[in-house]
Image: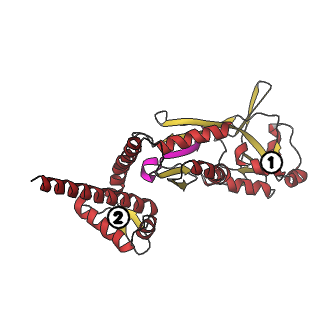
């Protein structure tokens, strides 16, 4: 009898591990949108990955994916299942790390951020962070629109501006001045500006940092606002920067969004003695679940980096 008990327990552990592996595969297929990409990531043959997911769907009694020759996408049931299962898998990872007691970060950290911020501020800093945590993987989920953290499976998102939802779990990492910039070639052609009202005679690039009521300025305790109509519109910071460098007009952005161009002289600051306020950047964590240790560690790392 004791031998049978041991065998049963081992079978139970084996079945549990198989089920957890299937759930982890499901999350990777959901985020990759591809069986083959998820299989490569987990070092599985593609047919095995498809078979495991098919078995999971039979056990659950619902189709989790819609499959076509070109794409794999979540069904409504699959999206709901993903939102429910990821916090559980994250809690398991955290529990394993706590039991090990080593403080070593493992697994995958999914970061949600804009493409411009990723290229300019995050990717150059990643080697230092990953050197400290060699067992950790990082995935950059880049979208210039705000992601749904739960649907996208994002562990921590980096967002600019005031947070409209006060219930979100967030940490302020930094705050950068908003500036006006233009190329020397544009200013040589169109003329310089002395006061904000001079913007009426200039071409404006309506970038992602444009405020709905226009551009606001403050100097010597007095505030003024200028309504602007962009001749060129850009929903991405990198496009707005490129348009300004190409002498298409004057753009508004955070100083972090054009730091390299200001340093090289391809862009110069306009109305530099007028204050346009600051733009905070926050690390935002998905509400309703505990933040991953890796997500908290990355937010801590960035806060120290930006303060340096």
Task: Please state if 128 lies on the left or on the right of 135 as rendered.
Answer: right
Q: Is residue 54 left or right of residue 197?
A: left
Around disc 2, counting alpha carbons within 10 Å, would you say few (fewer than 14), some (14 to 19), or many (20 or more)? many
Label 1: element kind? helix
**Which x, y percent locates residue 122?**
63, 50
Q: Quadrant of residue 174?
A: top right
Name of the residue lying farthest toward the top = 221
On residue 282, which mark appears?
none
Relative height, residue 209 to residue 30 (above, below): above
Q: Position of residue 70 (x, y in %)?
A: 44, 73
Instruction: Give how far across and how far down residue 221 sits, in percent.
Output: 77, 24
Q: Earlier in the sequence, mark 1 or mark 2?
A: 2
Asked if the stretch drawn in magenta spans residue 101, the answer is no
Residue 65's disc is 2
Give the secondary structure at mark 2. strand
In the rendered image, the vertical position of residue 30 relative to residue 288, given as above or below: below
Specify the segment rendered in magenta.
Answer: 149-163
Mark 1, residue position? 262
């Amino acid at each position: 009898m004791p031998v049978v008990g041991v065998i049963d327990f081992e079978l139970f552990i084996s079945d549990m591990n198989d089920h957890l592996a299937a759930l982890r595969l499901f999350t990777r297929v959901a985020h990759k949108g591809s069986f083959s990409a998820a299989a490569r990531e987990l070092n599985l043959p593609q047919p095995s990955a498809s078979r495991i997911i098919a078995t999971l769907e039979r056990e659950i009694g619902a189709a989790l994916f819609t499959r076509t020759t070109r794409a794999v996408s979540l069904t409504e049931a699959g999206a709901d299942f993903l939102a429910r299962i990821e916090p559980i898998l994250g809690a398991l990872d955290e529990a394993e790390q706590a039991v090990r007691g080593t403080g070593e970060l493992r697994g995958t950290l999914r970061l949600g951020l804009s493409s411009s911020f990723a290229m300019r501020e995050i990717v150059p800093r990643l080697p230092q962070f990953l050197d400290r945590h060699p067992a950790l993987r990082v995935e950059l989920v880049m979208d210039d629109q705000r992601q749904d953290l739960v649907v996208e499976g994002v562990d921590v998102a980096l967002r600019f501006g005031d947070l409209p939802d006060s219930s979100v779990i967030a940490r302020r990492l930094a705050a950068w001045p908003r500036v006006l910039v233009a190329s020397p070639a544009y200013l040589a052609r169109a003329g310089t500006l002395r006061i904000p009202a001079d913007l009426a005679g200039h071409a404006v690039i309506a970038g992602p940092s444009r405020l709905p009521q226009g551009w606001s300025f403050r100097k010597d305790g007095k505030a003024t606002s200028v309504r602007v109509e962009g001749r060129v519109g850009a929903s991405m910071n990198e496009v707005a920067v490129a348009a300004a460098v190409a002498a298409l007009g004057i753009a508004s952005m955070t100083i972090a969004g054009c730091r390299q161009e200001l340093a090289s002289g391809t862009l110069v600051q306009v109305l530099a003695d007028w204050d346009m306020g600051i733009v905070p950047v926050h690390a935002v964590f998905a509400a309703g679940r505990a933040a991953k240790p890796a997500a908290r560690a990355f937010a801590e790392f960035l806060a120290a980096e930006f303060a340096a």
